[in-house]
Image: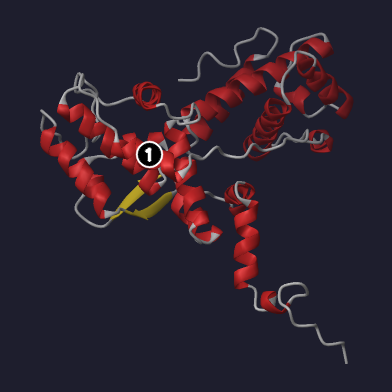
Amino acid sequence: MFSKYFTSARLCPDLQEAGRSWLAHLREEKKYSIHTCKAYGRDVAAVLTSLAEIRGGPLGLRDIALLDISEWRAAFAHHAGRGLTARTQARMLAALRAFLRFLERRRGIENPALALLRTPPVRRSVPRALAQADIRRLFDQNRDDTSPDWIVLRDEALFLLLYGCGLRISEALAITPRDWGKGEALRVIGKGGRERVVPVLPIIRAAVARYLAALPVALASDEPLFRSRRLRPLGPRSVQARMAALRRRLGLPESLTPHALRHSFATHLLEEGADLRSIQELLGHASLSTTQIYTRVNAHLLTQTYAAAHPRAGRMPGRSGKKTPPAQ
């Protein structure tokens, strides 16, 4: 699967083999997505090739331990000069550190100098959630006379799943009839193979039931639930294209994407008073810091929630006509 990575003639065979073994480890043991593995493979191979050019000869496993901070910095300066964003450089550094940890555990090769490199500051973008009024328009007017009825029902069921359960596209498209079952909760396998259970509202379960009743083919228990027009497993690009056509027809914002439904799920829960820890569990985030980005979406709401919930909020200066008694 990863044979095309680490193929530069500037990398010695032992380093090429170690790189491909690392990618297989990320995919098969760590359960990283194929997209993450490919990005990490490209990043690390590019930096190692640059290091070989800086050193003026092929780079092998033994050379990794001898690299000093000036060489690491020169390699990153080379890529920064190509106009790479701070986010891309941060990902490259994270990938390199992961590769070095792998080499240390599996090959006994260490390079303390890499730890001296600082991650470039990256400003995390605020997720673009839709207004609740736009969400209502999406589901109230999701009708397309040019599509077979089961296609319309499929889109309605899928979009409701993304918004109502906060699923990623990959998670929704991986659901099988066996996963779906008949209960009020859905077991989801997310990033890194992490499992979570999300509640399924009756309106979502009813929409999926309508879609399955109209689907012109019977599905095996282990086949993907959502099918394309040709009755093959539905792909993410098809979902994105359907969403783009729908938002143009309804005059909805360009920010409306399948993933924006997941952001809207989290943002609207926060607006309705859900706590961050619960939202973290529902989204399947490994760290609460990932979920905390949603607090930047509506800072005014958090101020109101704080004022309403804090035990001393009602007695703070300026919040009532009563004077605050002097300290004793």
Residue 6, given in percent of the width and then of the height, sits at: 60, 16
Residue 56, given in percent of the width and then of the height, sits at: 82, 8
Residue 192 visible in this rendered orientation of the protein: no
Q: Quadrant of the N terminus?
A: top left
Residue 142, given in percent of the width and then of the height, sits at: 29, 32
Q: Is residue 260 left or right of residue 150?
A: right
Residue 288, given in percent of the width and then of the height, sits at: 59, 54
Identity, as a three-letter code, of the amino acid under mark 1: Glu
Q: Residue at x 75, y 82 (%)?
A: 322
Q: How is the image coloured?
A: secondary structure
Q: Is residue 234 left or right of residue 100?
A: left
Q: Is residue 290 above or below residue 87?
A: below
Which residue extends farthest front? Answer: 321
Total residue callouts: 1
67 or 176: nearer the viewer: 176
Q: Quadrant of the C terminus?
A: bottom right
Q: Residue at x 58, y 24 (%)?
A: 39
Which residue extends farthest bottom? Answer: 328
Q: Residue at x 65, y 78 (%)?
A: 311
Q: Is residue 20 above or below residue 182?
A: above
**Label 1, on which residue?**
171
Residue 33 visible in this rendered orientation of the protein: yes
User: Callout 1: helix, strand or loop?
Assistant: helix
Q: Residues within 10 Å of mark 1 (few under 14, many from 20)?
A: some
